[in-house]
């Protein structure tokens, strides 16, 4: 069998060079990792800023407000309530007076307001306006020190502080703690799973080591790249999540095949070459599929998706590079020592799983009764995916943050005691300075019209005009929480009807620019952009992966089947997200308050990640079936042997992915929980029901037609019983 496919030639040549120059390959990889890690300490990373997230009318409004110097300064709030029972008014007022006296004049403080009672006089609020300090946050440590002192002096009261700076710092600290916890747990769990998969310490450690070094190298490389694509705060966690999953899986595929060939009597060099030609080919294809899926994030655009796409693409590329270069070198140097030291019980268990013993009982009925198996599995998948039809998305808000963060609990108590701080719209008008009077009249008319709809509330705030007289800002409140569906309805009405009605007919305002911004408007603009571009992203990703499968296997039915099965996995993932986070199934078990929606950016991210990662073992399984077909086996037998040969590897690979994603489901940040639940549930079902039941059942039913237009059958005189031996003699 001649080897002409570039995706087969490349890993084979890389393996041969690494196998004959092992120390050079190992040294080059170590130098690459060290250099990449060093970049992070030499080149400062560029983080995203507020301007990077501007989108649509809300983005334009934010730009105008910033250019005019009218952005609201950061503020901190101190809430004084009773520790138990009715509040002591005299004690609360005394505590508030101490807060005002202690915070007035502190560095970074512009103004401390007079204490304000809420309507039922159960809470007293002291608001602190912070000074503008460029792009840097004011240090609020002196303020929190005053708050602690007042709390100690008044033990019968609750004196709590939260605000723009302290809340952000608390959230960032919690995210860092969560990620450190996930990283600390994921490595030992992955190592244990590798021990179960291989039954030997060295074999178990190699995939984890390569995945870890791939992640470390990618984090270092992201530092200089962030100067081109600013790095979003969550990108490191995504690199760890995806890097550990694909890095371990790629090494697992390669190492499993190399051990299998050695067990069949090949030399180490022969085994490495066969693994390069088969598993190495699968690694390149599956890595390309992941990268193709991730490029779909660029279609959506925006700072978050661009940053996540770059980080994910790089870590996958680095993991592929390590798997086809340094891994063959390590295997050649270790030889049969890679199976040492053995863990006796796990070694025996591994030998049984490796022979497909656990899947044979399932495969038999599937192959004998493919129609029944496909029908039953399809019913299960459809039932699990059906809730996705009711998917509701919304931006993250205060209610989606962990309630055990003191600053979050304080802010929730503050908004409950002072409900005026709800959703709001910011109307920004850009006009000539001599048109101030007309702008003021039009804004007054707009506010009157808005209040009359019932969607907006009267406010004591007056319009604010910039020093040059060209930009005017009016903030109009709404009597709804930001997650309320009526907020978007009100904003659309404001933009399309109320604002034009107030300004288009106003005299002397020709050429004035009017836009609606604010946090709620930014959420609406994001949802509109996502709904507009999501079909393009889905179509783009599916088309790319379809073309890759078509080019790899040269079979139209296989490419179509791959696409359908991937969509089934995505549907199951979305179904689980709806059941858990909209309907609250398992909320107590996972430790979160049911928000009633899925955070807006997650469905798209889960979709592209899942479409990419599910291709890992799909390509591996179908490639093995293709090997048996190349050797001349009948289609039904090729399917049965291919699935049985790869069942143990697929189980191990899926176990790694599910365990890593499940760890994220245990973290306190709701975004991480949603991502972990969606991916873990879909991968678990994909690796079992989809790939071990639906895939073989569909292939058996299609028979020879599955490989149209060209069935890869060897001539009769070239058919062999052992595809691996045929590969070994084809060099």
Image (spheres, helix red, strand yellow):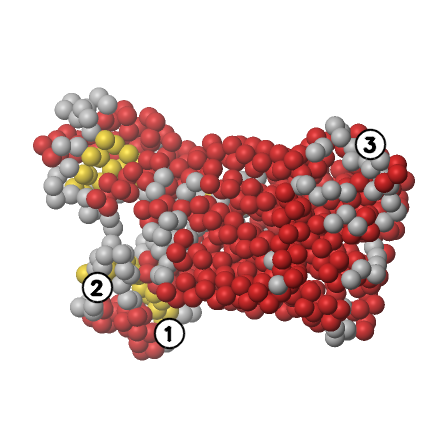
Q: Secondary structure at mark 2?
A: strand
Q: Could you tell me which quadrant the N terminus lies in?
A: top right
Q: Where residue 405 sits in the image (x, y, percent)? A: 45, 64
Q: Which residue is mark 2?
A: 109
CA separation in Å, label 2 and label 1:
28 Å
Closer to the camera, 31 or 240? 31
* Residue 679 in view of the camera: yes
Looking at the picture, does residue 646 appear above or below residue 663?
Answer: above
- Please name which of the two marks, 2 or 1, marks the residue nearer to the observer: 2
CA separation in Å, label 2 and label 3:
77 Å
> Tags 2 and 1 in contact by the CB under 8 Å rule?
no
User: Who comes first in sequence, dot 2 or dot 3?
Assistant: 2
Asked which quadrant contains residue 258, the reply is bottom right
Looking at the picture, does residue 26 appear above or below residue 385?
Answer: below
- Please name which of the two marks, 2 or 3, marks the residue nearer to the observer: 3
Q: Residue at x 71, y 58 (%)?
A: 272
Closer to the camera, 400 or 66? 66
Q: Residues within 10 Å of mark 2 (few under 14, many from 20)?
A: many
Figure label count? 3
Q: Residue at x 37, y 49 (%)?
A: 228
Q: Which residue is mark 3?
A: 704
Q: Secondary structure at mark 1?
A: loop
Left or right: 458, with 341 as reference point: left
């Amino acid at each position: 069998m001649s080897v002409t496919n570039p995706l087969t030639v490349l890993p084979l040549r890389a393996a041969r060079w690494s196998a004959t120059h092992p120390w050079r390959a190992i040294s080059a990889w170590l130098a690459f990792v060290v250099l990449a890690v060093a970049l992070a300490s030499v080149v400062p990373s560029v983080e995203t800023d507020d301007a990077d997230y501007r989108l649509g009318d809300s983005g334009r409004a934010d730009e105008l407000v910033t250019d005019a110097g009218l952005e609201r300064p950061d503020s901190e709030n101190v809430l004084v309530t009773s520790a138990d029972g009715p509040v002591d008014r005299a004690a609360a007022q005394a505590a508030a007076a101490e807060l005002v006296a202690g915070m007035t004049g502190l560095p970074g403080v512009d103004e401390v307001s007079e204490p304000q009672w809420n309507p039922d006089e159960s809470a007293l609020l002291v608001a602190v306006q912070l000074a503008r300090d460029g792009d840097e946050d004011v240090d609020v440590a002196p303020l929190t020190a005053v708050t602690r002192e007042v709390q100690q002096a008044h033990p019968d009261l609750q004196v709590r502080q939260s605000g723009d700076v302290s809340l952000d710092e608390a959230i960032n600290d919690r995210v860092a703690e969560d990620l450190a916890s996930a990283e600390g747990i994921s490595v030992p769990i992955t190592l244990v799973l590798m021990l179960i998969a291989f039954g030997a310490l060295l074999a178990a450690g190699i995939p984890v080591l390569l995945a870890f070094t791939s992640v470390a190298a990618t984090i270092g490389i992201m530092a200089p790249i962030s100067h081109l694509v600013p790095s979003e705060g969550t990108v490191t966690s995504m690199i760890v999540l995806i890097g550990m999953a694909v890095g371990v899986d790629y090494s697992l595929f390669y190492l499993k095949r190399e051990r299998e060939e050695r067990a069949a009597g090949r030399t180490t060099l022969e085994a490495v070459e066969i693994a390069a030609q088969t598993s190495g080919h699968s690694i390149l294809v599956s890595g390309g599929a992941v990268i193709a899926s991730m490029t779909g994030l660029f279609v959506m655009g925006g700072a978050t998706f661009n940053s996540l796409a770059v980080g994910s693409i790089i870590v996958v590329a680095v993991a592929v590079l390590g798997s086809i270069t340094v891994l063959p070198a390590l295997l050649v140097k270790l030889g049969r020592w890679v199976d040492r030291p053995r863990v006796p019980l796990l070694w025996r268990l591994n030998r049984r799983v490796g022979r497909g013993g656990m899947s044979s009982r399932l495969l038999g009925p599937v192959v004998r009764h493919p129609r029944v198996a496909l029908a039953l599995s399809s019913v299960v998948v459809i039932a699990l995916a059906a809730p996705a039809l009711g998917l509701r998305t919304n931006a993250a808000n205060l209610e989606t943050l962990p309630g055990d963060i003191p600053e979050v609990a304080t802010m929730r108590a503050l908004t409950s005691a002072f409900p005026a701080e709800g959703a709001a719209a910011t109307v920004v008008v850009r006009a000539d300075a001599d048109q101030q009077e007309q702008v003021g009249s039009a804004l007054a008319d707009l506010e009157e019209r808005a209040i009359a709809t019932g969607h907006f509330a009267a406010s004591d705030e007056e319009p604010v005009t910039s020093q040059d007289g060209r930009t005017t800002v009016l903030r109009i409140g709404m009597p709804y929480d930001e997650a309320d569906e009526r907020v978007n309805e009100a904003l659309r009405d404001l933009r399309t009807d109320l604002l034009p009605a107030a300004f288009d007919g106003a005299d002397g305002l020709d050429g004035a620019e009017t836009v609606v911004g604010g946090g709620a408007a930014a959420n609406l603009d994001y949802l509109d952009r996502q709904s507009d571009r999501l079909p393009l992203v889905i179509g783009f990703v599916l088309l790319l992966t379809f073309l890759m499968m078509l080019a790899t296997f040269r079979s139209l039915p296989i490419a179509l089947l791959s696409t359908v099965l991937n969509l089934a996995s995505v549907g199951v993932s979305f179904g689980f997200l709806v059941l858990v986070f909209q309907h609250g199934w398992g909320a107590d078990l996972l430790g979160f308050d049911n928000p009633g929606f899925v955070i807006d950016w997650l469905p798209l991210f889960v979709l592209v990640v899942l479409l990419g990662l599910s291709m890992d073992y799909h390509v591996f399984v179908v490639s093995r079936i293709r090997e048996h077909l190349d050797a001349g086996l009948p289609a039904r037998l090729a399917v049965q042997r291919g699935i049985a040969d790869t069942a143990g590897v697929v189980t191990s690979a899926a176990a790694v992915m599910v365990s890593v994603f499940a760890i994220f489901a245990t973290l306190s940040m709701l975004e991480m929980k949603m991502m972990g639940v969606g991916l873990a549930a879909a991968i678990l079902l994909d690796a079992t029901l989809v790939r071990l039941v639906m895939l073989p059942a569909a292939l058996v039913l299609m028979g020879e037609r599955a490989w149209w237009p060209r069935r890869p059958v060897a001539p009769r005189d070239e058919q062999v019983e052992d595809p691996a031996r045929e590969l070994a003699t084809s060099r």
